[in-house]
Image (cartoon, grey):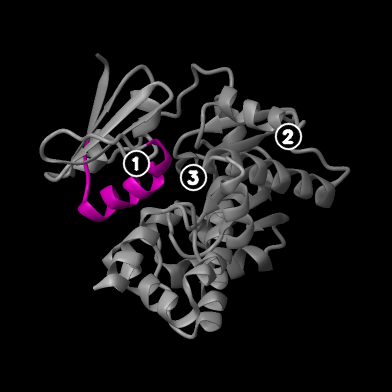
């Protein structure tokens, strides 16, 4: 069976467990933290840090979490962008006027999901690189916020869509997967940006890929929407497209701002990500405001909610 193996830190693995909560298997192999089954791929994460992806979609699913080289500490030399898929962007688009989109907050228990679209013109690419626009995962939050301010000063057209926690939990209760939520948020953000820059039409739109194109299109169809023209999907797109990198920075900045507001509302600092500290903070917040109030601040279907309730029983 085709497979991919990643070596990941424990924190990443517990983030993954929260992410795959709706698809978790009841039984796990000896020495495993969790097992999950998604379309075309089985995932098993072990206490050793090894994560095994098996099935026809092993490469796509593992690509959400890293690569063999980057996960094991090997060479991180950037590979050529793939061009075999009909939805892969032509290489010429990276140097042309195009739109990129990305999201933040999907793996965080506290806080919303934020999606940004940015339209970068060909003659702005070099300046964006000069001010430090690159993969936001290589930057800390203060750096990201500083660069975001410079992006805005340059007059880069962008749009933002924020899915607050109450609405997130409502959609999740309706049976929406996080993938469907993201698809609709990206779709909405791009339509907003098109209106903003009209009558200009970008040469293409690159989405930092989180789902197979056919799955993305299926999500749209369930809400009577269709894919726009010249839309491309690419994993780790911020490494190739300056527009996606700019969108990633804008989305992360919005997420951090929303987290600050939620922390002020809660009267305590709400940590990012998913960790023991997050579990304990959730328990404190529930004790303070009641278990029903957590939906204002968090994605309640994450395993963190159950862990927090267990802390409260001690």
Residue extending furthest toward the bottom = 267
- Residue range in magenta is 6-23
Which residue position holds label 3? 238
Quarter holding residue 70 = top left
Residue tagged 1: 65
Q: Secondary structure at mark 1?
A: loop
What residue is at 35 percent from the left and 66 percent from the top?
A: 309
Q: Residues within 10 Å of mark 1 (few under 14, many from 20)?
A: some
* Cα–Cα gap, marks 2 and 1: 28 Å
- Residue 136: quarter of image: bottom left
Question: Which x, y percent locates residue 296?
Answer: 57, 68
- Cα distance, mark 2 to mark 3? 28 Å
In this view of the protein, which residue sits in the foreground, 4 or 169? 169
User: Label 2's element?
Assistant: loop
Where's residue 158, x and y in %?
Answer: 70, 55
Locate residue 5, reporting x and y percent: 22, 31
């Amino acid at each position: 069976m085709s497979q991919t193996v990643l070596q990941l830190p424990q924190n990443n693995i517990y983030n993954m467990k929260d992410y795959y909560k709706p698809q978790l298997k009841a039984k796990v192999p000896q020495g495993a933290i969790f097992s999950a089954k998604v379309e075309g791929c089985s995932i098993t994460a072990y206490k050793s840090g090894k994560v095994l992806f098996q099935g026809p979609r092993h490469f796509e699913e593992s690509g959400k979490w890293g690569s063999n080289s980057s996960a094991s500490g090997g060479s991180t030399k950037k590979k050529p962008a793939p061009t075999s898929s009909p939805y892969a962007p032509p290489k010429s688009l990276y140097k042309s006027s195009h739109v990129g989109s990305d999201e933040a907050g999907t793996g965080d228990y506290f806080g919303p999901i934020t999606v940004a679209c940015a339209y970068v013109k060909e003659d702005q690419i070099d300046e964006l690189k000069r001010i430090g626009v690159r993969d936001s995962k290589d930057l800390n939050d203060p750096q990201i916020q500083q660069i975001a301010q410079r992006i805005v000063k340059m007059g880069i057209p962008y749009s933002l869509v924020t899915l607050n926690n109450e609405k997130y939990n409502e959609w999740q209760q309706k049976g929406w997967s996080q993938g469907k939520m993201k698809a609709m948020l990206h779709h909405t953000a791009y339509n907003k940006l098109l209106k903003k820059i009209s009558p200009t039409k970008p040469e293409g739109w690159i989405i930092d890929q989180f789902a197979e194109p056919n799955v993305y299109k299926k999500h749209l169809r369930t809400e009577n929407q269709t894919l726009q023209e010249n839309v491309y999907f690419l994993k780790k797109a911020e490494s190739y497209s300056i527009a996606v990198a700019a969108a990633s920075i804008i989305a992360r900045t919005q997420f951090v701002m929303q987290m600050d507001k939620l922390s002020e509302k809660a009267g305590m600092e709400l940590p990012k990500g998913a960790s023991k500290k997050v579990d304990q903070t959730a328990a404190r917040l529930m004790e303070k405001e009641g278990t029903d109030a957590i939906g204002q601040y968090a994605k309640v279907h994450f395993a963190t909610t159950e862990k927090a309730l267990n802390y409260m029983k001690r």
